[in-house]
Amino acid sequence: MDDESLPGLLCQESMICLTEDVADKDAAFVRTKSSSYGGDSDEEDMFLKRLVDREKTFGFNKGFQSVVLGDWLKCARLEAISLILKTRTALGFCFQTAYLAVAYMDRFLVRRPNIDSEQSWAIPLLSVACLSLAAKMEEVNVPTLSDYQVEEYRFDSRVIQRMELLVLNILEWRMCTVTPFPFLHYFISTLCNESSSSSHVLSRTAGFIFANKKGSDLIDHHRSSVVAYAATLMALDQTLTRPALEIKINSVSSLHELLEIDTESVVSCYNLMQKLEIPEFEKPPLLPSDLSPIDVVENSSVTFVIGTKRRRFTFSDSDQIDRLLDEKRLR
């Protein structure tokens, strides 16, 4: 199999994305997601109803129990999210792609929460695989796997490909996660006044969406539509009191019926964003593999290069990535 793994995952996108500069890709994404109803109010309502139905099926884990991560894995997850966002910028991906990658990674960790610090390569590799899969779902121009070089880690394409397949299997090929971004066209166009720059509001809204994702645990406690609503309100005004917020929300009551959103959920999410702080976790003592650049390559085994020394792990090829994670899960 060549470097362009799993080509069948490539999605069909509107031609509008092909003519936009990288700086405008996120605005183009929002416009593209609204293009299917062509500005017609009834068709727009049908589009949003379909989104809500999909959100109930694929995009919200209200019934799931929270997963408690150790401090090392919490820290590794935050670093992985930052890595996804940096790589998103470097490769010119839209916000939707990066968010989808984080969602895949979190869903994986819900099912495989026992990765420990001895597997320090696993989380960066997981983040790269999830971003690659998300790009196949959302981007028109998908980089080859060799283009995903992440800071100290340089992963062989076949190792990334093997992790992609593991992620697909763990997630049972359910890749249709509904994110907050398809809802943004509706919220921004409804809540913004004419003097507001929609691109500026979009950028600020995306910042609050990702801050919420980084500050939360692995389970989404608010629906994506609620997160999009609260983040848009935050982008417009971060200082609303509860009475002012309720007045603002109730002024567009049609949103509630259409999207089946209750005021309390939006207020709760908005208040969380207001006081959101990314937690600082105490890092464990540095491992040797943390002290210098690491190459992960696939020859007869996976080898970590540490300066002039080599630290060789016991598994002989990328097929044992999933077995290694299974052993941790079963302990």
Image: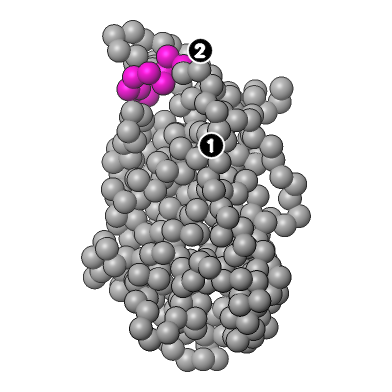
**In the picture, which quadrant includes the C terminus?**
top right
**Left or right of 95 on screen, residue 256:** right
Q: Quadrant of residue 274?
A: bottom right
Q: Is residue 177 magenta?
A: no
The x, y position of residue 11, in whole percent, is 42, 62
* Local crowd size for mark 1, using a 10 Å CA cut-off: few (<14), some (14–19), many (≥20): few
Question: Dot 2: what SS?
Answer: loop
Q: Is residue 296 magenta?
A: yes
Which of these two is toward me, 256 or 131?
256
The residue that mark 2 highlights is 314
Q: Amino acid at mark 2?
A: Thr
Q: What's the image's color scheme?
A: one colour
**Left or right of 142 on screen, residue 67:** right
User: Would residue 261 be seen by someone viewing this image from the given angle?
Assistant: no
Residues marked 2 and 1 touching at CB (< 8 Å): no
**In the picture, which quadrant includes the N terminus?**
top left
Question: Dot 1: what SS?
Answer: loop
Q: Amino acid at mark 1?
A: Glu
At 50% from the left and 53% from the top, the residue drawn is 211
The residue that mark 1 highlights is 280
* Local crowd size for mark 2, using a 10 Å CA cut-off: few (<14), some (14–19), many (≥20): few
The x, y position of residue 280, in whole percent, is 53, 37
Tell us which disc is closer to us: 2 or 1.
1
